[in-house]
Image (cartoon, coloured by chain):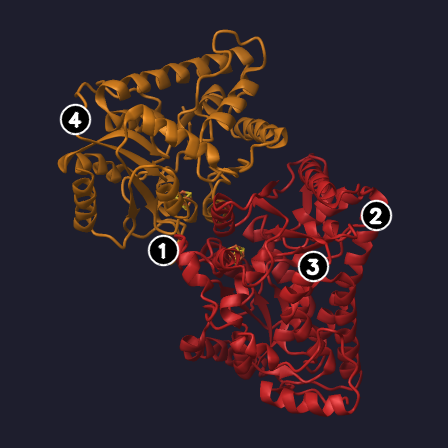
Amino acid sequence: MRQSPRKISLAEWDTRYAEMKKEGLPEPAYGGRLSRHVNNGDYRLKRLSFDNSPASLDLWNFLLTEDERLHESRKAGRKIVGTMKDLGTVPVMAYAFPNITAFYPDGAWWIPCVMEMSAGLLRVADSLGVDESFCPVRAMLGAFVTEAHFPIPDLLVCSVGATCDDFSAIAQRLEAMGHAIVWWEMPHRRTPLTGEPSVRMPGGLEAPVDQVAFVRGQLAKIRHVLEELAGAALDDDQLSAAIRVANEARDLLERLRRLVFTAKRCPLPATELLIAEMLTIHFCSDRDECLRVLGGLLAEVELRVAAGEGLLDADAARIFWVNPVADVRALTLFEECGGRLCGTDNMFLHALDRIPSTGDPLECLAMSALSDPMVGSATDRALRICSDAKTFGAEGIVVSRIPGASHCALEGTIIADVVRSRSDLPVVELEVPPVSDAFSSSLSTRMQALVESIKQRRRP
Amino acid sequence: MKRILYRSPFVPPEWIAAHGFRPSRILPRNLAGSGGPVPTLQGVCPFMRGVIREMCSHTDAAGIVLTTVCDQVRHAADLLRRRVETPVFLMTVPATWQDPAPQALYLSELKRLGRFLVEHGGTTPSDVRLAEFMLEYEKRRSEWRGILSKCGSKACSEHMAAFLASRDLPDASPSQERQAGIRIALLGGPLHLDAFDLFDMIEKYGGTVVLDATETGERTLPGPFHRTDDFHAPPLEDLARTYFETIPDAFRRPNNRLYEWMRNAISERGIQGIVLVRHLWCDTWHAELARCSDELAVPVLDFELGEGHTDLGRAVRIQAFLEVLR
Ligand code: SF4
Ligand code: SF4
């Protein structure tokens, strides 16, 4: 059943799937032929290429069946919590309750891409006055209106403050449409003053103790709201246990990322890695299965690395990628242009870093939340990018802008500034719209230019 | 006296003045042109660019105070720190307000601002000194409200802009009577100085602005202090509470107080139409547009102050809007 690693098309997957089935492929309940998702509207799959391992098949199927899982959770009597914007904090706490399933409505960000605009969500957002000057997360409004994707949550919680204006504005619009939201404040993370008590955060930054205490207080409020919804109290032991499970997922991912970024030959395509990163944010609505899927992917990658196998050209340019792409096809294009991932900052590194696990668990969670790269300065974020790029041996950096995102223009400028002042790595900025086909030649030109300049620099 | 430059209505000038500085609220005259540390890029709010460019031209300033009320300003503060030598202070203004913790955070941010001011040459004010400045600004605000009832919104907003820029009173108080006409409210983000001609444009086509609820107008005047006559309790707490609780704004979460405030104003002042003023790429106000139309029982005109509209195009929009309201 195992084959040497290769990127294959959707049609090739169908053939391979049939063969694997004959050979007795063990499958989870959500398993099946990948192309069936096209019948549900996920047309973009036809334009992508995929890793050919059974572990990757599970990964894709797990991702693409999340809405079904959420509807099943509702039917099974579980409470559904829509956690918004914090990416990686509240779900850790929510999954500590046996009767709560948490997910990010923000994930609708990718629906216009995956369904190639066929779902009409952006049109709905337009009709609500949220046009293309906002980032693709506006699709979330459409998903709430059409109710054709995730179930409407029993509870919505949203972090605001040092978050992007797009999301804050859109969430407010959602509340005004009748979806009550419990807001919690995330302050802008600042550098401690001289002599001010501070703590070291995941990711290596320092933050003032007072800010951690403030965020802890906000999370205590959310804990209380979740307790009311679940009809049960959550004690510190249960929360600590939930943090341990979250860290299990983060540890798996950390090992996976390190191998993917540093192996001699690239053992996993960029798209599959991006999906793996996304799973850890909220376990894709099933914590146990998420651990299994990540574990399977890691095992496959470990085998490949041990066997010296890889997918892309052995001399692919090693590139650090900043920001998620609104169209996953752009990552396929990136690899076709001769690049491979060598480090990522998809705006949620705090959801990948280990959560501190000693002491008060709520404080640990607060530290994790406050280490969000998007709530501090872009300079802090850029410094981490420089340090990670060095650790993983990146040879260049792509800063991928998100159309309409309020933070991107200035943040991109700052990141490029810092990288250029701290290293001699070439930096390319590009913008990826939700369906980028019309721009693929200009995107390719920019990516190829970066790849070529990296290869030139390698020459003695 | 050295100046401290600021922009947001959530930065109390009383607090800066009490530290021995001249607080100077920066409003750019116009937004055209390039230059300044913030590049002209797609996605960047031109008003914010203009403010930062203007701030950087005041090289004699002792400091710049920006706030976190908007993502773009937050990042601009970061860029500014990298590009200019003037010390920059970024003050957290919480978006939420429904539990006591955000207000306590706002108070602690004012204290941190105080330390910044002292570090850069100011002196820690006594309670009495702070109270004096609070009373002075309180008096100004009640004068502005007086001007408003007699002379209209433009006079008041101009008077405010002049005083808040320098702490000097303009030579003459406005005396012109408010013109009759279709009663219009301006609502939205800040006006730069050249955009004040919007008031005249509205008058020209038969309207009169009876409420300036833009960020540079009456909406952002904090309500009266709780203890202006009796400052035995720490006045800083009163200052923090008043600024934090009484300025309705679109960025607050939830922002229903803005709508309550507008609904009251609409009924009290007999407002017949709203011109929603927003800058290009300003998500905060842009997202409120449809809701204003849904929830405020008067017609709303979307009025974007961006490169996308010519002066003529703007005038035509105002004219058409007023015709419809007639
Ligand atoms: S992509 Fe950027 S602007 Fe859009 S929701 Fe995410 S952080 Fe906000
Ligand atoms: S107008 Fe809007 S985008 Fe511009 S600075 Fe103000 S709040 Fe920010």
* Residue under the point 17% across and 48% down: B316
Q: Amino acid at mark 4?
A: Ala
Mark nearer the N terminus (1 vs 4): 1
Between A191 and B252, the residue placed more toward the observer is B252
The residue under label 4 is B180
CB under 8 Å between callouts 2 and 4? no
User: What is the C-alpha distance between the residues marked 4 and 3?
Assistant: 62 Å
**Which of labels 2 and 1 is toward the front?**
2
**Which of labels 1 and 4 is toward the front?**
4
User: What is the C-alpha distance between the residues marked 1 and 4?
Assistant: 41 Å
- Tell me the crowding category of disc 3: few under 14, some 14 to 19, or many 20 or more residues within 10 angstroms, Cα based: few
Between A207 and A105, the residue placed more toward the observer is A105
Q: SS of the residue at dot 3?
A: helix
User: What is the C-alpha distance between the residues marked 2 and 1?
Assistant: 51 Å
Callout 4: residue from which chain? B
Q: Amino acid at mark 2?
A: Gln
CB under 8 Å between callouts 3 and 2? no
The residue under label 1 is B40
Relative to B96, is B66 on the left or the right? left
